[in-house]
Image (cartoon, rainbow, N blue to C red):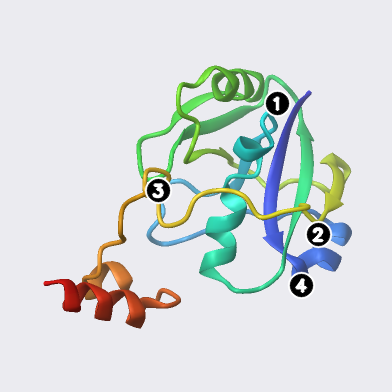
Amino acid sequence: MAVFVHIFAERDRASIKRSGIRVVRGRRRRLNGVFVSPVTESYYHTHQWHREVRRMEQIPKLAARIRIPDDEKVCIGKYNEPHLEVTAAQAVAMARQHDSPEGLEVIIPRSVRFEEIISIYKPPKVTGWRYSPQAKGRKPCGCSFCQRGRPNSRKIRESCEEGT
C-alpha cells in the first residue's frame, strides 16, 4: 500500500474525519482530484507543499496520511507541467528516485474515503519553498499580473518599482 500526505485547512478537520477528502474541482485546472505528496525518507520532500499552501491562505494547516492500493492509477508530475499516469507504487518510487523532487505533486483522481486515512496530525514545523521550487536566492516578479491577489504583494510591487 502506497502512503501519501495531503495538506488541508484545520477548519476542515471534522468534515474529513466524518466523510474523507473530497475531489478538488477547478475550472482552470487540467486535472481534478486530491492533491498529495508521496511519503519518502525526506521530511522536507514529503511536506514540501506545506509552506506554499500556508502562504496562499494564512490559516493553520494540518496533514493527513493516506494509504491507497499500490495498483491504483494516479497522476504524477511537477507543478504546472504535464503529468504521467502511473500506479501509486510507481509514483512513490519515482519520487524517491527523482533528481529534484521539489514541486512534485501526485493527484488521486477520486475522493479519499475516511477508511483510507491513517492519521491526521499537525506537522511539527513549516518546511518547503515559497513562490516556486527554484525561487531560492531570486527575487519574485513584481509585476501586477504575477502578484495579483497574493499576500504582501504591495510590498513586492513597490520594491520592484524602486529597483527600476
Tell me if residue 24 can be seen.
no
In this view, the residue in front, 93 or 122, is: 122
Q: Which mark is residue 41?
A: 1
- 4 vs 2, front mark: 4
Q: What percent of the width, then of the height, locates residue 27? A: 41, 62
On the rendered image, what quadrant is the C terminus found in? bottom left
State how many labels appear.
4
Q: Residue 72 sits in which quadrant?
A: top right
Q: Earlier in the sequence, mark 1 or mark 4?
A: 4
Label 2, on which residue?
16
Label 4, on which residue?
11
Pointers 1 and 4 in contact (CB under 8 A)? Answer: no
In this rendering, position of residue 18 left or right of residue 140: right
Amino acid type at image mark 1: Glu
Marks 4 and 2, Cα distance to the nearest angstrom?
Answer: 10 Å
Disc 1 packing (10 Å; few <14; some 14–19; many ≥20): few
Q: Earlier in the sequence, mark 3 or mark 2?
A: 2
In this rendering, position of residue 142 left or right of residue 105: left
Q: Secondary structure at mark 3?
A: loop
Q: Residue at x 54, y 20 (%)?
A: 94
Q: Residue at x 50, y 31 (%)?
A: 101
Q: Which mark is residue 136?
A: 3
In this rendering, the answer to whether 157 lies above or below 40 is below
- 4 vs 3, front mark: 3
Q: Earlier in the sequence, mark 4 or mark 3?
A: 4
Amino acid type at image mark 2: Ile
Marks 1 and 4, Cα distance to the nearest angstrom?
Answer: 29 Å
- 3 vs 2, front mark: 3
Disc 3 packing (10 Å; few <14; some 14–19; many ≥20): few
Q: Secondary structure at mark 1?
A: loop
Tell me if residue 131 can be seen.
yes
